Image (cartoon, rainbow, N blue to C red):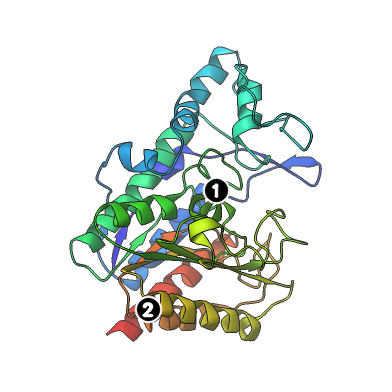
Amino acid sequence: MLTVYSDDHRLHFGQSELVDGKLQPCFEMPSRADTVLARVRQQEIGEVIEPKDFGLEPILRVHDGAYVEFLKGAWDRWAAEGHSCDMLPSTFPARRLRRDGPIPTALHGQLGHYCFDTEAPITAGTWQAVYSSAQVALTAQDHIRQGANTAFALCRPPGHHAGSDFMGGYCFFNNAAIVTQAFLDQGAKRVAILDVDYHHGNGTQELFYDRADVLFASIHGDPLVEYPYYLGHADERGEGAGTGFNHNYPLPHGTGWAGWSAALDDACRKIASYAPDALVISLGVDTYKDDPISKFKLDSPDYLVMGQRIAALGLPTLFIMEGGYAVEAIGVNAVNVLQGYEGASR
């Protein structure tokens, strides 16, 4: 299996996020991708290549132009104001504040407008890192477009919490959505996205909620008690043309493989019935029993079985790296999915 990876991810290294009322070191750190890459090489699962540059156009097919321009110039504006620490928002357009009015011109106002939490710090290297992360995904997608059955985009920063014009949850550009749109722009009629990250892919849902050409299925912690809280309930089924093409599987704290795999089986049945031309996997492994910010109980051997079940769909499959914060185990668990898939595909 081809792996696409860029060292540019190290340019984004947030020093702090606001959690439980205090600033603390970010759980999303460069060592996450480094650990996965080391495991890819150790297990010799295939060639590792650097990304091509497909430019901004595929990103702008998914993300609002003003939002992209904000991200591109945010750090330079921040530094020009005399700041050197990470950028984090302090004000948000909450209920009963005007949300449809003019976007503030002040940097702090724009930051709150485009960000929905305090867990996506912008740093001096963030723009290049997120741009390169999208190119990693697009290069892997291009490999499948040229006839490969599968590829692994070792993206960092991750993407599934980012929506059309907002960031949050460590995510800035939605890599899974960008490659999904690329498949469609290149002739695919239908694409399915399966999000196996512990946290709901709220950004991905927002982007495709009213569309019938993308089926989205997400297995995640119940938003009544788990981040991102305000999206991911089972009754969110899509709207308009997209009605019936959004499937959420919110599960309780403590869910182990038996309960989690039952949701996976149902999601796979829906994907098979949909008969997509390609399948995109938002591959988060923060469902692991020792993940520091998650509360499911999957163990490392379960990820092999996960990969086998996905392979049984028999679809061209693009794996996009998302979450997973037990850094010592993230490489084993992510690569177990890939090896389970490859073993079942032969």
Q: Quadrant of residue 197?
A: bottom right
Q: Quadrant of the N terminus?
A: bottom left
Mark 1 or mark 2, which has the lower sequence index?
1
Is residue 12 in view from this perspective? Answer: yes
Binning the other alpha carbons within 10 Å of mark 2 as few (below 14), some (14 to 19) or many (20 upward) gives: many
3 and 167: which is toward the camera: 167
Q: Residue furthest left?
A: 146
The image quadrant of residue 221 is bottom right
Horizontal and vertical percent position of residue 262: 59, 84
Camera-side residue: 295 or 30? 295
Percent coordinates x, y for residue 168 in the rendering: 60, 44
- Residue at mark 1 to residue at mark 2: CA–CA distance: 27 Å
Query: For residue 341, which numbered disc appears in the image?
Result: 2
The quadrant the C terminus occupies is: bottom left
Position of 161 relative to 74 (above/below): below
Query: Which residue is drawn at the image coordinates 28% and 51% (left, top)?
Result: 185
Q: Where's residue 224, x and y in %?
A: 77, 62
Amino acid of disc 1: Met
Residue at the spot 32% in from the left edge and 75% down from the top edge: 315
Q: Residue furthest right?
A: 21
Q: Which mark is residue 29?
A: 1
Rendered residue at 60%/62% (across/down)? 326
Quick one: SS at disc 2? helix
319 on left or right of 150 = right
